[in-house]
Image (cartoon, grey):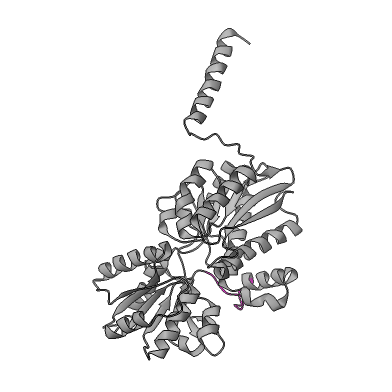
């Protein structure tokens, strides 16, 4: 080697060391990959206050990836899934992320257990260059596009917009008095901000914004306030437990507005708890349920029942479908990456997915370099209190008056 070439090589090595020392992180793109294994992590609430919502999601992810393993894996590699319980706690979720990335050395990540945890971790995800498929929560994660963060369906902001679009533009209801019910959480605050913004766009005034404690078992003061204001329409941006509490209390106080729920209120468990008190309940969701009849749902049921007893069917509703969809989308991106799998290749492959048919599990999904949200579409559902299921009353719709 010539003297000049040796000097140039030394400069290059010193430059790399300097960049790494300046927090411009040097990442080994083969992290989490063995000759026959792809290590993936899941951060979920397994035993905490939102476990009823999140357990079906990670079960859906794990079951789908198990199915892929049993049918040959991805170009000869099989998934090793490591699930961490964050108990809906930001500090625990951050610790779990560090454990998965630094100790377990995962290739990619599914889920982050809460909106607050996602906000705390989004920049760490980018710094560590970990491809992440996270449950759709807030626009914060996708506008502007985060390089390593992908999501599947509509965000909370999308859902609030869709519900108001449906009530005002599609149904053209007049003389309405709209109110919002939410929890005092990051999830609730995101919904409240969008609710206020959208009312301003429509030239409407809020007729109330009531807060219910997460896990709260009574809502009498909130109902009395809304009833006093002659509210005609309530947006429930809550979890299923709070939704059930609100509807039971509303029925007790003979308060009968039209009630519209966002995704986590759109749960069959809510209907089983409140039954006839949900007769005026509508909800929006990106995902189909276990009992729907699309080809994707039929395939999901067939595969799932190979691994789980029929007696467990009650957990396989929309949240399970959501996890299943996450698995399908990630596997499709990994397949497209090819046999020479690495993280940068995965990102490019993911961004190549265009109008990918989800078989009715959710709307078709499209990604791109500046679009890391698969779909902004939802359906509106009406509660069927006799059969304790949700029946779709629209096609897939977006807030910008787009339909298919």
Magenta: main secondary structure equals loop
Q: Residue at x 63, y 61 (%)?
A: 61
Residue at x-position 46% and y-position 79% = 217
- Figure label count: 0
The reply to whether residue 100 is visible in this rendering is yes
- Residue 179 highlighted magenta (yes or no): no
Q: Is residue 200 above or below residue 260?
A: above
Task: State left or right for residue 289 relative to residue 183.
Answer: right
Viewer-proximal residue, 115 or 349?
115
**Which quadrant would residue 328 be assigned to in this image?**
bottom right
Q: Is residue 116 left or right of residue 177?
A: right
Residue 50 or residue 318, whichever sits in front: 50
Residue 380's quadrant in the figure? Answer: bottom left
**Span shown in magenta:** 287-295
The picture places residue 153, in percent across and down from the top left corner, at: 49, 63
Residue 394 visible to the viewer: no
Query: Can you say whether 67 is above or below 122 in the image?
Result: below
**Residue 239, position as x, y percentages in the image:** 48, 72
Side of 259 where 360 appears, left or right: right
């Amino acid at each position: 080697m010539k003297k000049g070439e040796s000097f140039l090589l030394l400069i290059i090595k010193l430059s790399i060391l300097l960049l790494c020392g300046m927090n411009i992180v040097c990442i080994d793109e083969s992290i989490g990959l063995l000759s026959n294994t792809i290590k993936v992590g899941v951060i979920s609430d397994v035993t905490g206050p939102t476990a009823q919502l999140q357990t079906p999601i990670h079960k859906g992810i794990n079951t789908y990836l198990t199915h892929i393993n049993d049918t040959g894996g991805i170009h000869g590699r099989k998934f090793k899934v490591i699930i961490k319980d964050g108990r809906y706690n930001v500090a625990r979720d951050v610790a779990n992320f560090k454990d998965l990335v630094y100790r377990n050395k995962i290739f990619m990540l599914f889920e982050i257990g809460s909106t607050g945890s996602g906000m705390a971790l989004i920049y760490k995800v980018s710094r560590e260059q970990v491809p992440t498929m996270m449950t759709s929560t807030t626009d914060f994660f996708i506008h502007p596009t985060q390089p390593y963060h992908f999501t599947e369906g509509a965000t909370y902001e999308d859902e609030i917009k869709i519900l108001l679009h449906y009530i005002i533009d599609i149904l053209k209801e007049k003389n309405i008095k709209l109110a919002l019910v939410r929890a005092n959480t990051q999830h609730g605050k995101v919904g409240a901000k969008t609710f206020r913004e959208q009312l301003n766009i429509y030239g409407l005034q809020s007729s109330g914004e009531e807060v219910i404690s997460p896990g709260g078992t009574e809502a009498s003061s909130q109902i009395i306030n809304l009833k006093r204001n002659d509210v005609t329409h309530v947006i429930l941006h809550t979890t299923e437990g709070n939704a059930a509490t609100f509807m039971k209390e509303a029925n007790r106080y003979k308060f009968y507005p039209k009630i519209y729920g966002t995704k986590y209120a759109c749960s069959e468990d809510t209907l089983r708890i409140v039954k006839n008190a949900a007769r005026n309940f509508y909800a929006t969701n990106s995902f189909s349920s276990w009992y729907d009849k699309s080809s994707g749902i039929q395939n999901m049921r067939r595969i799932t029942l190979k691994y789980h007893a029929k007696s467990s069917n009650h957990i396989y509703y929309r949240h399970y479908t959501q996890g299943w969809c996450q698995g399908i989308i990630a596997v499709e991106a990994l397949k497209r990456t090819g046999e020479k799998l690495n993280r940068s290749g995965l990102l490019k492959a993911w961004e190549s997915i265009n109008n990918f048919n989800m078989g009715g599990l959710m709307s078709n999904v499209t990604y791109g370099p500046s679009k890391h949200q698969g779909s902004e579409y939802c359906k509106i559902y009406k509660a069927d209190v006799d059969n304790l299921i949700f029946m779709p009353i629209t096609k897939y719709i977006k807030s910008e008056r787009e339909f298919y």
